Amino acid sequence: MSDTTLDGPVLAADGTPLKRSLARALRRQKLRALMLIAPLLIFILVTFIMPVADMLFRSVENGIVEDTLPRTVVALADWDADSGELPSEAVFAAMAADLKDAAEAKTHTKVGSRLNYENPGISSLFRKTGRRAKKFDIEADGPWKEQLIDINDGWGEREVWRTIQTYSPTYTAGYYLNAVDMQVGTDGAEMRPEDERIYMLLLKRTLWMSLLITFSCILLGYPVAWILANLPMRQANLLMILVLLPFWTSLLVRTSAWKILLQQQGVINDILVWIGLVADDNRLVMINNQFGTIVAMTHILLPFMILPMYSVMQTIPPSYLRAAKSLGATDWTAFWRVYFPQTVPGIGAGSILVFILAIGYYITPALVGGTTGTFISNRIAFHISTSLNWGLAAALGAILLAVVLALYWAYDKIVGIDNVKLG
Amino acid sequence: MADAASNDGFVVFDRVQKSYDGVNLVVKDLNLSIAQGEFLTMLGPSGSGKTTCLMMLAGFETATHGDIRLDGRPINNIPPHKRGIGMVFQNYALFPHMTVAENLAFPLEVRKLGKSEREAKVKRALEMVQMGEFGGRRPAQLSGGQQQRIALARALVFEPELVLMDEPLGALDKQLREHMQFEITRLAHELGITTVYVTHDQTEALTMSDNVAVFDDGRIQQLAPPAQLYEKPENSFVAQFIGENNTLEGVVTELNGDTCVVRLDDGEELDATPVNVSKVGERTKVSIRPERVEFNKDRLHADAHLLKAEVMEFIYMGDVFRTRLRVAGNDEFIIKSRNAPDQVRLEPGSQIEIGWLPQDCRALDA
Amino acid sequence: MKLTKTLLATTALAATSGAALADGHMANELTLVSWGGAYQASQVKAYVEPYLAMNPGVTVVWDESSAEATAKMRAMNEAGNVTWDLVDAVASDAMRMCDEGLIEELDHDADLAAAPDGTSASDDFGDLLVSDCFVPQIVYSTTFGYRTDMVGDTPPTSICAIFDLDAYPGKRSLQKRPIDNMEWALYCDGVAKDEIYDVLGTDEGVDRALAKLGTIKDQVVWWTAGAETPQLLADGEVVFGSTFNGRLFSAIAEQGQPIGMLWDMQSFDLDGWVLPAGLPEDRKARAMDFLKFATDTQRLADQAAYISYGPARASSAPLVGKHAELGIDMAPHMPTDPANSGNVHVYDYEWWADNRDDLDAKFQAWLAK
């Protein structure tokens, strides 16, 4: 048997080379393993990877202009927007022909809505012109320049044509520029006017407030987790139910409860007035601002901090603290030098959870955030459900995703991601 | 030594009681004095109160009643970190986020020693346990035995006068354990430190200690050097707990000074040394070590009482033979004989007679 | 007499519906999308239950998604699987969906019932047909309520009391969007009613409106859900608050809260049905059949017995009666009642459709600062 190793490939009992038969056996195992995880893989692919990819695609996709106005896009390519002249008759004729087709297909208002994000007024320009466009006779009528301008003055504005030209490519960076408070101006990208800048402010605020929320969760959650980890099983379970209780009530109910507590005629103010700490005509403003948002969100996210900390603390035997004390450490030194460093992985896991959840929250900030406590997610939700500017929503979402990934990377560099333990 | 605690001991437990729930006493009226430089082992089954005593000494539990004194000073109200007692824990309790050297430097740091002094002491301590190379490693990168040495070094590095060890060898395999037993006693004697060692392993207790305190039911049953504990157990618990032991029950029929005659329940009689019996007619348990039972009549006193026995089983164990007998209705009577060229191998089924020297058979409490 | 005539007319109508059903071309399940709450309840009582009574085989499924109707419609449209048959939406949403091609254009005269006196549907609805895709049901208004016990002896009569912190100190709640608030601000800054949109169309006009709002910004609680203002008023958190008039009606009439109505410059808005584009024939036929029934003169008048929103048909107004449970006369509580509509703000859908995104960005940037 052993001499085959000298002469040639090792053979299995049935004569096939051992390597091949091993590979076949392994392949079957891998295939089986793959089949077992296939449901999850498919689930993740369909519900997570594909939507994220779709979002990234939407944030740059701009095919609608080219698809709806193919002739115009071609004809407009040569026009110099800074020439001070309107586009030529050929462009107007191409637009008339495109509009006629689009009106018949009922897509003219769609492209109007798209371009309206960039230049207010284009929506109604397309809608109104579209009503007439069905009756256009491209061959017989004309000249189209006069005709279109006659139907609506908007066609005589160079800015309208510039917008169409700027947004004719299939892909656009416009949504991203908008998402960082910039726009495509006459000389390329430029900052938006002061009174329209909002997203960078909101992004910074979202990150800052999420940090504060994470920090207050650590501050409040740490002692609770410690008590949980050190109580006898029965009491610990009871306390754990109390910690998890917020999970079982609806988010709206919890948020509304904070309103009742924190508002100016609310329970806390009433008590403060009653014990004389606060004058009745000078009640504290604790809701509809950042404070209210931080309080309500800390409450909601606290379990996500407590649970990982608790499960890490549970694995730390009490003998470490005893050992430290026997070696001469005071209670504080024993805690700070011996116990606390071992709980850092739990704090890290909890912080990542809470921070990422906080960044994406929008219901609570919308209800109790007032004007200074709104998050960038509120604007994303607004663009998804109200303005229907999904491209901008996608760009904002992609930026948020990038920021989270960057922070995650930084965390990995500074603390080390293998230093994160969920239990 | 076992009863009244003398006041000149280095460590003194003076009528110490401990209760956790206010109903049951875990430690009942404990008196114990440990001399400077002594290696004392607290031995007992789990729940006997030995670990509680150790924890009270370390300061992690407070005595419900009574005084604990260290070097003449009551320490009941001194917090653990001010007691200056070194301690080795069952699971070593090495801090996993620190290197070995950092672990060792920790007690020096909290005592605010200078950096160079710290390093020198850490180095010396590591060399003392033959772990000089391992200062930069994390505890998780060490084997159990290595961790054990580091834990020992950490407990000794700040040069305490008293070291407590709570079943420190429990997690090691047999060979390593025996080696470490030797290491620990060597270090303890070399450094001249007082050691209180808790274990439930009687071999460990016998091989390592100057004195052993056998705990049961919250009390010290016997406090004695190992040989005395083995040879002269003072009650049947100690006799049973330490080493292998044969027990027969009966009634004292004669009591004359330092010997007595006990009649077993089947009517046979034997010779014994009275220990816990005071009068004729008292019931007693007699205890005989297996290796002290003799079946060769030539080696016994001519007028010694003999018992009939039937050989049930013969086990060859290499250095010794182990024979199981039925004696006075007891099937589990064991005798051990040395494997010598002239040694008889008893055949199962054969009837023999056995006896012993009266001083080897102790009549204890029933 | 007129009532009997109407009843006869509707019975005839019901007969035709029944005949259509017999053809077997209509689906038997109807998915309706509405707002939930008291409003949806009024729809159930006024025409869904009667319709089901006439068409025993039909079942209705409700989806309370009107607040996100546009986004969900677009998502369903993109996925090619529209599960809704008829959607209740506000006019501005309807226009947006119409622009996006998400809903069907309708022929109002052919698809809807004429008034009992023979007036065509398009004449009966009149100006309220703001989009080809939209069938209005009700006229509601966004208007102010005030705490009667917090305004002293001089209850406000003009909308501009909102901006008068000296006479009416305390917080006010406004909707967190530019629509209405910008117009009210300009109006109270002295702009004539018919020039509001011309002014608002300029950058200076926007600045002017925001500056006016800025005078009370510190005292404003911004709301996003219609239920917030009644609650804030009930808790005494605010002196004034804007919300939908029906919400204020129920706080006053049903809950007896100390709240007064400030009808001045109330902002009329419309709510109605839209039909998703591209439905299969049988479902579309069922939806159209229901639509015709649910928007006839009597049904719209009936709805007013359950909620204080004005019927969108001119012919329904005389038929508005008493509240179904409270028994109070509903007419005085309608935003369209002459006593209430002396000075109204008519909000320009077309203008907002063009400028909403732009103004919203500016408004939000202003809010965040």
Image (tube, coloured by chain):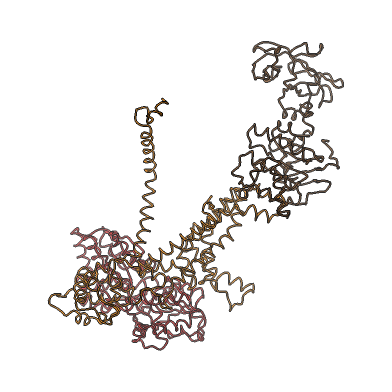
In this view of the protein, which residue sits in the foreground, A96 or C75? A96
Residue B147 location in percent, x, y? 64, 42
Chain letter for the brown part? B
Q: Could you tell me which residue is drawn at 87 percent across and 21 percent down? A: B257
Q: Chain C is drawn in which colour?
A: red
Identity of the residue furthest to the left in this view: A140
Identity of the residue furthest to the right in this view: B257
Quadrant of the drawing holding the C terminus of chain B: top right
C90 relative to B33, above or below: below
Tell me, yes or no, if residue C98 can be seen here.
no
Residue A373 location in percent, x, y? 49, 70
Q: Could you tell me which residue is drawn at 64 percent across and 52 percent down? A: A338
In this view of the protein, which residue sits in the foreground, B99 or C186? B99
Residue A153 location in percent, x, y? 25, 82
In this view of the protein, which residue sits in the foreground, B264 or A119? A119
Q: In this view, does C222 lie to the left or right of A171?
A: right
Quadrant of the drawing holding the N terminus of chain B: top right
How many labels sit on residues?
Answer: 0
Chain letter for the orange part? A
A51 relative to A286, above or below: above
The quarter of the picture where residue A69 lies is: bottom left
Residue B229 location in percent, x, y? 77, 29
Tell me, yes or no, if residue B275 can be seen here.
yes
Identity of the residue furthest to the front in this view: A7
Q: In this view, does A167 lie to the left or right of B167?
A: left
